[in-house]
Amino acid sequence: MAAPDNIDAPPILTVEGMSVDLKVPSGMLHAVNKIDFSVRPGQTFCIVGESGCGKTMTSLALMRLLPRSAKLSATRLNFDGHDLLSLSDHAMAELRGDRLGMIFQDPMTSLNPVYTIGNQMEEVYLRHRKSGRREARERAEFMLQRVGIMSPALRLKQFPHQLSGGLRQRVMIAMTLMCEPRLVIADEPTTALDVTVQVQILQLLTKLQEEFGMAIILITHNLGIVARMADRLAVMYAGKIVETGSALDVFTQPHHPYTQGLLRCMPTHDHGAPATRLGSIPGIVPSLVGDIRGCGFANRCDYVRDACRTGDIALRELPDGAAYRCVIPPDEALARPAELATP
Amino acid sequence: MTDATVKAVPEALADGEIVAPSPREEMRRRAKSHIGLIFGGSIVTLVTLIAIFAPILAPYDPYDQDLTRRLIDPVWKTGNWANILGTDALGRDYLSRLIYGARISLMVGFGAAAIAGTVGSLIGIIGGYFGGRVDSVVVYLINVKLALPGLLIALSLVSIVGGSVGALVLILGFLTWDRYAVVTRSVAQQLRGNDFITAARAVGASQTRIILGELLPNVMNQIIVIASLEIAIVILIEAALSFLGLGVKPPEPSWGLMIAEARNFMFFKPHLIAIPGFAIFLLVIAINMAGDGLRDVTAPEGRN
Amino acid sequence: MLRFILGRAVMLALVAVTVSFIGFGLLRLSGDLAAVLAGETATAADIARVAKQYGLDQPLYIQYLDWAGRALQGDLGKSLFTHEPVTELILARIGVTIRLAFSALLFALVFALPLGVIAALRKNTWIDRAVLTLSVLGQAIPSFWLGLLLIYLFGVILRWLPISGSDTSWHFVMPTITLGLGTMPALMRLTRTGMIDVLSSDYIRTAWAKGLHPLSVLFKHALRNAVLPVVSLSAVLLGFLLGGSVIVESVFALNGIGLLAFDSIKRIDFPVVQSILVFLSFCYIFLTLISDIINARLDPRIAL
């Protein structure tokens, strides 16, 4: 766990009832379905789930970078005192890259191939700080040093294709931190990288968080990364948050059958048993098109009962801000893992 | 680091995507709703039918001259239905010539495309499949072809061998193979490493068999799409050559030649150039639309 | 850089030699050139004399080497028709053709770039469809017919523009439009597809995520990448325009190299025809090399 859970500070980001709907030929696809969460300053909040669960749509929605076919709605969407829903495009653009930054999955394609690293880093500072070129260059050099890049002056003159994937992701991070954002959304920031480089990048993120004090929303499908980084986490499934809480609570006392399934697939030691994939949970993810009734996990769940198939499943609140979305009461849910140990 | 990953079961359910119906079904659905394909395809079919049934449809012999009935105006000026589109400077019925002209355009267009498609695709597949030196030769051939000023070569060749429809088919066929070669070459390059090619080689299939039996069917879609667009280009070139007097020879009713013959009268009989020109324009648009439609329907990922 | 240029240069030199051979050989395939030159009433002795006079009695490769050797020194022989040196004939006419080709390309780009960008930004709206329709129309209209229509409209009915010759800049207006309209569709489509591809790329998403001004995202980040292929196509098209101006030059009686080639083809003036063929091929080869170099300068990923 990277930083103490700083529960007293007011949240920097509050999301309530946020949905993202995509228009597709066969109807309306509910990619994100009425999710709630909040992130406090300096905190690392992980959103974990399999691909297609809506986690990337969530991150793009927070940046207001959704594709044109997508419709965003929420009862509350507040970042650092700004209502992200009513903000004009212009004001939103001023926020992005300044107070709110994003790191993308693939560093190989996320930098513009025809401009130098320096040019691309400096333009963020020039735009948001209205500074002079020299100041921007100094800032870029400083940031490259912060992300552990040797000879920054040289790197600034290079083009993206002259750098390795790991270096490029460091550049992406440095670029995102140019204006010291309060919140950084990192969407699978290490997935495209070699395993050894992955560790370095995660260590770097932790170090930079201590240094600059920004909050991080880390989006990943990798539970190892969650265990390593998260203060709090949300497990997403079929567009909904099915379980949320502090990393310690969720990892030690998972309530939702899906979360339990995920954790069961995770090796207990860092270099322990070979990775098992969630593919071993039988069944398929339901189509998210049209009205969804009951629990999205029902057809894969070992504990499915009639109540799972109808109506909205209510959220069950637990102490310490944790919650899970299942018809099974907490004591019954907690009794399960032992029984599951021998499938 | 641990590597417990959460993996989606249905890959197609990535963000913002939905599970698609079968490709063939999808293709049919797209074809039915593609206005350009329907419109272009209908006109091409119509013109083809007109060309085939020209002897039945044409009211007069397109070669019959009647110097007493020269330059008659079309029906909308005279109200006389005997010569619906009037007559040309030699008293020949314009509608009949227009109808027979469709034959020349289509024969040259399809004939040249057949030759160019065969030659170009073979060259391209061989280069892409074998690679190495063979491919260098293919690249060299393509470069030579591209560097030659095609129109001037065509004009020179026609001036040497004369402007029969057969000669034009051959000449234009050998001057328009490059695009087929470029595309099939790159497709063959992508395919050569694929499992089904390796498998064919492993069971001892001959090179000829692999090329004709495995590679060719896989590039057929692309070849058809290129052909549809090249037919249009060839029709335009034939018209231009005939217009310049180095294409189809008089008294054949080529649309390009009809425009050339009407050029001297264009200032007081503009319909004489407007009608055949519009016929070329319409046919070429229809073929282009049908070709674009085919591409959209067969390879929607390549559409923009 | 040097290595890249050398590699290209070797291929292009090979192509150039082949092209020169084709250009040289083309008219000699027509049969007995000497007989044609000597005229229909010539006796066998006349033909033999003519053959000797033009060196046509020598083996073909000797004739070629002889011609190529002199061509390398700038001596392309004399016209059989006007007896002027071919080099002078070409130099006297090339200015008109270059002027026409450049203005047509400029005309095409001035419309193609903004329209392509707008279509990409408003993908699948009526603006996009209008631009695509325009490109289909532009591709389908026969250039000689368009030329005649323009002459009829602006030269005859409105009397705004001169209809033939190359004396003033006004004389170039209609030829430029005619040739430019035919060139525009390819450039427009390429700009549009390039822009659409780039706009959906990850680095454009990054640019938005950085909160850059929309104009900066569009022009600094997107357009620069989208025009890379347009630049190389422009250079290649310029090559085509130089060789493809035959039709337009003949419609508007523009005294350029295309018209010279056309007239020379008609009167079997082979020293002129072969020289122009080779000259235009070399222009094309040179322009493709230029386009490679420009592209390498614009795109840092291409290591020279």
Image (spheres, coloured by chain):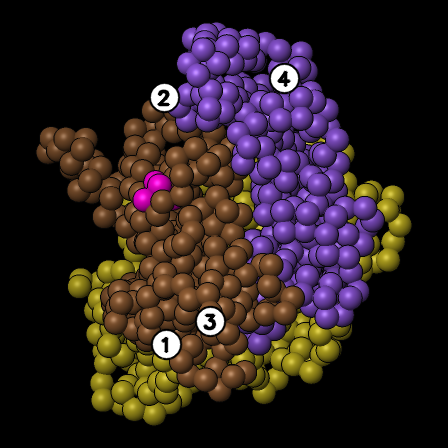
Chain colours: A yellow, B brown, C purple
- Answer with left or right where residue A313 lies relative to residue A245: left
Spatial distance from mark 4 to mark 1, Cα to Cα? 61 Å
Instruction: Measuring from the top left, give residue C174's x and y in whole percent.
Output: 71, 57
Element at label 4 = loop
Q: Nearer the viewer, mark 4 or mark 1?
A: 4
Q: Which residues are magenta?
A: B166-170
**How many numbered marks have been drawn onto this rendered protein structure?**
4
Q: Quadrant of residue B195?
A: top left
B196 over B275 or under it: above or below: above
Residue A169 in sight from this viewpoint: no
Spatial distance from mark 3 to mark 2, Cα to Cα? 65 Å
Amino acid marked by disc 3: Arg
Q: Nearer the viewer, mark 4 or mark 2?
A: 4
Amino acid marked by disc 2: Arg
Q: Are marks 3 and 2 in contact (CB under 8 Å)?
A: no
Q: Residue at x 89, y 50 (%)?
A: A132
